[in-house]
Amino acid sequence: MDITSKLILFTITLVSLLFVGNADPIHVVNRDFKPDLLNFCKKTSNPTLCENTIQSHFFKHFDPSEALKVEVDATLAQTQKAMAIINDLYKKSDISKSLKDSLDICKEQYGLILDAIKQTSDAIAARNWVEARSQFGSIISSQQACSDSFEGIQNEFTFATDSKAIFDLGGNCLDMIVDLEKSEPQIDLPMTESPPSPFDNVIGPVS
């Protein structure tokens, strides 16, 4: 390499260093939320599922109530998937009576789950953790009722894995709700008053 080439190379290198030195600082995404996520998920029944479901939704600051919403949405999606499988099974021409009876139960129970998820979402938005806990408790019960209906015909329970996923996600949601209920003061909501009874002022047995 001659002297001219060396000077050109030196000049290019110097200019590059000056440019880097004067460039705007690179903004790196803050992922400090990871320890908060791990600490939050370890309080659930299935921490690995919790982490895998939630971690892609946070890039800066971790918010427990937002994490709960993500897990609730995942439970909703899984329930809708199971409902689609049930509807496809109904279309089979060789469906047995025992399978149809179980599908009838599961379709009813999963319909209740969808309704309860809607009620839970409303309760979470209002930060009414008592109501949210009550609604998600019913979700676990409905999932179990569906699973129990396949006792004796487990070989026909083709969506057992999807049903188990609903149970695992729902269990995590319930754990999160309980944790949030403990960490936040519960808002005292007004009690719904019952209408007056014509027997309120009656003393003794009513004949």
Image (tube, grey):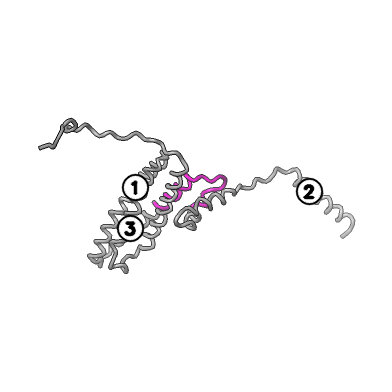
Q: Is residue 68 magenta?
A: yes
Q: Which residue is mark 3?
A: 144
Q: In front: 64, or 158?
A: 64
How far apart marks 1 and 3 lie (CA) works out to 15 Å
Which residue type does callout 2 highlight?
Leu
Q: Which residue is located at x 53 percent, y 53 percent?
A: 38
Q: Is residue 95 magenta?
A: no
Residue 168 percent location from the top left of the image = 41, 57
On screen, residue 93 versus residue 15, left or right, reads left
N-terminal-most mark, 2 or 3? 2
**Is disc 1 surrounded by few (<14), some (14 to 19) or many (20+) residues within 10 Å?**
many
Magenta stretch: helix, strand or loop mostly? helix
N-terminal-most mark, 1 or 2? 2
Q: Secondary structure at mark 2?
A: helix
Where, quadrant-wise, is the N terminus in this rendering?
Answer: bottom right
Where, quadrant-wise, is the C terminus in this rendering?
Answer: top left
Which residue type does callout 3 highlight?
Gln
Q: Which mark is residue 8?
A: none
How far apart marks 1 and 2 lie (CA) works out to 61 Å
Q: Are marks 2 and 3 in contact (CB under 8 Å)?
A: no
Q: Which residue is mark 2?
A: 17
